Image (tube, helix red, strand yellow):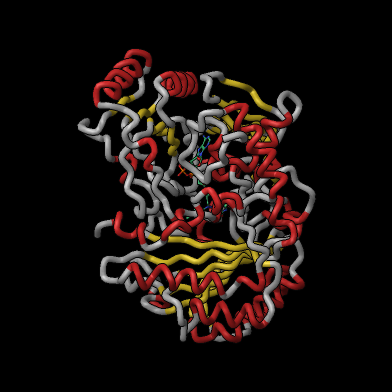
Amino acid sequence: MNHSSAYAVFGDMTFPADTSSIDILSMHDRDELAGKLRARLTGSVLVPDDAGFAEVTAGFFNSLVPHRPAVVVAPASQEEVRITVQLAAEAGVPIALSNTGHSQPISIDGAVLIDLRRLDDVQIDPGTATARVGPGTRWGQVVEAAAKFGLAPLCGSSPGVGVIGYTLGGGHSPFFGRLHGWAADQVESMRLVTSDGAARDVTADTDPDLFWALLGAKGNLGVVTSLTFRLIPVTRLYGGGLFFDGSAAPVVLPAWRELTDSAPRELSTSLALMTMPDLPMVPEPLRGRLVLHVRLSHLGSAEEGADLIAPLRAAAPLLLDSVVEMPTTALATIHNDPPASPPALERTALLTDLPDEAIEAVLKAAGPAAEDPVMLLELRHLGGALDEPTQITSAATAQTARYNLLLVALLLPDLSEAVLSPGLDNALARFEPFSEGTTMLNAMGTADASPRGARAAYDDTTYQRLAAVKAQYDPDNLFRFNHNIAPAGN
Ligand SMILES: Cc1cc2nc3c(=O)[nH]c(=O)nc-3n(C[C@H](O)[C@H](O)[C@H](O)COP(=O)(O)OP(=O)(O)OC[C@H]3O[C@@H](n4cnc5c(N)ncnc54)[C@H](O)[C@@H]3O)c2cc1C
């Protein structure tokens, strides 16, 4: 499939490629920069013809956007990250960051790509119940390490997601968020490399503006090379999934809404409507079917949890019930996110309510007689501690939201892109009456990567303040391969 043809379909709304940097470097300049980097680093420095060059971008979760960085650097230490930023900045070359590759919404053509995966150290301090991680760390590593002390992080649904990328986006834990709030609110300190090549230790006391801005501006302000954050104690956890046939959606959806209306903060839940692949790795009862998967996580005893979800369990015949008392090391089985995705486009919205008309919209977008070709529709229940005052920039808009909506459409070679894009947009439009037009940064993908799209993650005052901090620390917008905040004055 020619991916580049997929872009034009989305017009200005979803234009993903930043072409401004493609020709920034001549081959001579590129080789000169690579030479300077090799002279200072022990980590690998690769240019396009080198073996292993394409391996990093080939491993990105969503293969929708093609990437042609100029140089790929894998620093061996925090100091080597700093040197890389310094040399790229001196050469005037923009910088892209990658740990897991779970969200690279726009093309990183022409960039120096810093591959952070090697720097994946995790240290747990049980005395202070904190974790300190390097920039290559994934949630699964922290969950494993913290579990030894009866602790857990406010992690996301997938163990493969990067700790720092997730946390700088606010970080919504679908397991613990309703009881403990946003992951970014647990951050105590960060070490940040800024575009001037300086390494700064940032806390709320030392640099209040920068600290505030980092908690929700993701990679816009530099490279966070170390993050220290608080963990939570977990004594008992009852969680898993209830799987219903998609045909039961008209009765299960209202039952799920009822559960969310009365759920205590200890209970977090989300649902996904999707057609499961007809593959041996999928449990037989689910294979090839439209399935409604309700995910549940209860911080408490199995008895209390079972009582809370009894009406939902009884709402319709179950294809599969995996809800059990579990250790935190089994958290990943609650959502069972895939390790990679085919080329896909996402749309997202925060919903203020889920009236009958919104349930009708869910069915029209992804139900048994769907009118829009949406591959996956997810609703996450928010509220609880997520509503409490937070200093997280990107969550400022979430405080009146009750649910987060995520819609995913696959771009498969045998499906017409021209049909798919309006399908996804039609599906999103159905939810307009229940949304304030705001979005959760971490749920945003390529379709929201235009400057206009990125603003939807912040209210206006927050965006202006972020733009001022950006102008101070990254005036030339070297860190631009993201949901970009333009430096104030540009
Ligand atoms: C399957 C799946 C499940 C998810 N579940 C959740 C969830 O439950 N809750 C939630 O809130 N989000 C969730 N997300 C979204 C996820 O948090 C974001 O995609 C996040 O940006 C991923 O970060 P990463 O480092 O893994 O990805 P990468 O693609 O490696 O990095 C993405 C971006 O993060 C920034 N970044 C990464 N590392 C650094 C760093 N060290 N310093 C500065 N910036 C950095 C950069 O801007 C980079 O471009 C999920 C995503 C996927 C694909």
In this view, the residue in front, 103 or 254, is: 103
Judge whether residue 77 can be spotted in this image.
no
| Residue 128 position by quadrant | top right
In the rendered view, would you say 478 is above or below 295? above
Q: Position of residue 390 (x, y in %)?
A: 75, 46
Judge whether residue 228 can be spotted in this image.
yes
Q: Position of residue 79 (x, y in %)?
A: 48, 19
Q: Position of residue 490 (x, y in %)?
A: 56, 35
| Residue 209 position by quadrant | top right
| Residue 265 position by quadrant | bottom right
In this view, the residue in front, 166 or 67, is: 67
Q: Image point 63% across, 46% down: which residue?
A: 170
Instruction: Work out which residue is located at the far right of the displayed protein and give it.
Output: 389
In this view, the residue in front, 410 or 133, is: 410
In the rendered view, would you say 118 is above or below 482? above
Q: Quadrant of the N terminus?
A: bottom left
Left or right: residue 237 versus residue 449 is right
Q: Image point 74% across, 61% down: which residue?
A: 400
